[in-house]
Image (cartoon, rainbow, N blue to C red):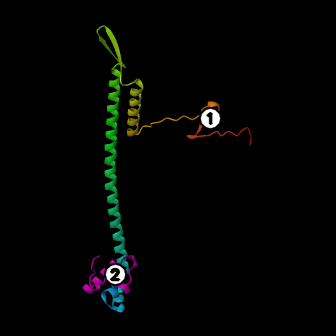
Amino acid sequence: MERLPGESTQAYEAFRTYAGLGPGRSTREVCKRLNKSIALIGKWSAKHHWVERAAAFDDRLDRITQEAEEAKLIEKAGEWAERMQHTREEAYQMASRLVEKAEAMLKFPLAETISKDGKTIIKPGRWTFADAAKMLDVAHRLKQLVTGLPTDRHEHSGPEGQPLPVVNSQVLFYLPNNGRDN
């Protein structure tokens, strides 16, 4: 809020009071706060275009507020983008370690054979092929998830298992009519 040429210090301070009242501002409130007559405040208001200047002041404050809010949103978005990237990288590394572990498991036999004093003892392993398969499945799904690839595939079929026709990339659904022709 700049002081206009020819605007006295008192008139300018009265305008600052008026503008500072916000959207519900009134010259009567300025009179009360500064203990000035309504005639004097009305004269200053008209002569120095208080209504227009206050509207411009409000617009400027709105722009500043909006820019500050946008800056905060951009900052937060950046923080969340970094968190997401870090989480994705951690998940991908974990999935890679799971694959390595499953591959190591598959290199070892399911049972350990020990020969002692002419006797053969077969000691079962502590894992199964199902364990390795589950680990690989989890690892691959995790990698698909963090790289944006689909993790599930769904196929739908129409009557009697026939494929659903595709028209304009939209699937037509067949609803049974329970033997009724409509």
Report the residue that reaches farthest toward the left: 9
Q: Quadrant of the N terminus?
A: bottom left
Q: Element under label 2?
A: helix
* Quadrant of the rendered image containing residue 165: top right
Q: Which residue is mark 2?
A: 18
In the rendered image, the vertical position of residue 129 relative to residue 37, given as above or below:
above
Q: Residue at x 33, y 55 (%)?
A: 76
Instruction: Please provide percent x and percent y for residue 41.
Output: 34, 88
The residue type indicated by label 2 comes to: Tyr
The label shown at residue 158 is 1
Residue 4 part of the magenta segment: yes
Which one is nearer the viewer's eye here, 3 or 32?
Answer: 32
Instruction: Please provide percent x and percent y for residue 52.
Output: 37, 78
Residue 139 part of the magenta segment: no
Q: Main secondary structure of the magenta part?
A: helix
The label shown at residue 109 is none
* Quadrant of the rendered image containing residue 113: top left
Q: Residue at x 35, y 67 (%)?
A: 63
Instruction: Please provide percent x and percent y for residue 157.
Output: 59, 34
Report the residue that reaches farthest toward the top: 118
Q: Which residues are magenta?
A: 1-29
Q: Quadrant of the C terminus?
A: top right
Task: Give the number of the mark in front: 1 or 2.
Answer: 1
The residue type indicated by label 1 comes to: Gly
Instruction: Judge the density around disc 1: few (<14), some (14-19), many (≥20) Cα neighbours within 10 Å.
Output: few
Q: CA distance from mark 1 to mark 2?
A: 72 Å
Which one is nearer the viewer's eye here, 62 or 104?
Answer: 104
Q: Element under label 1?
A: loop
* Quadrant of the rendered image containing residue 47: bottom left
Q: Earlier in the sequence, mark 1 or mark 2?
A: 2
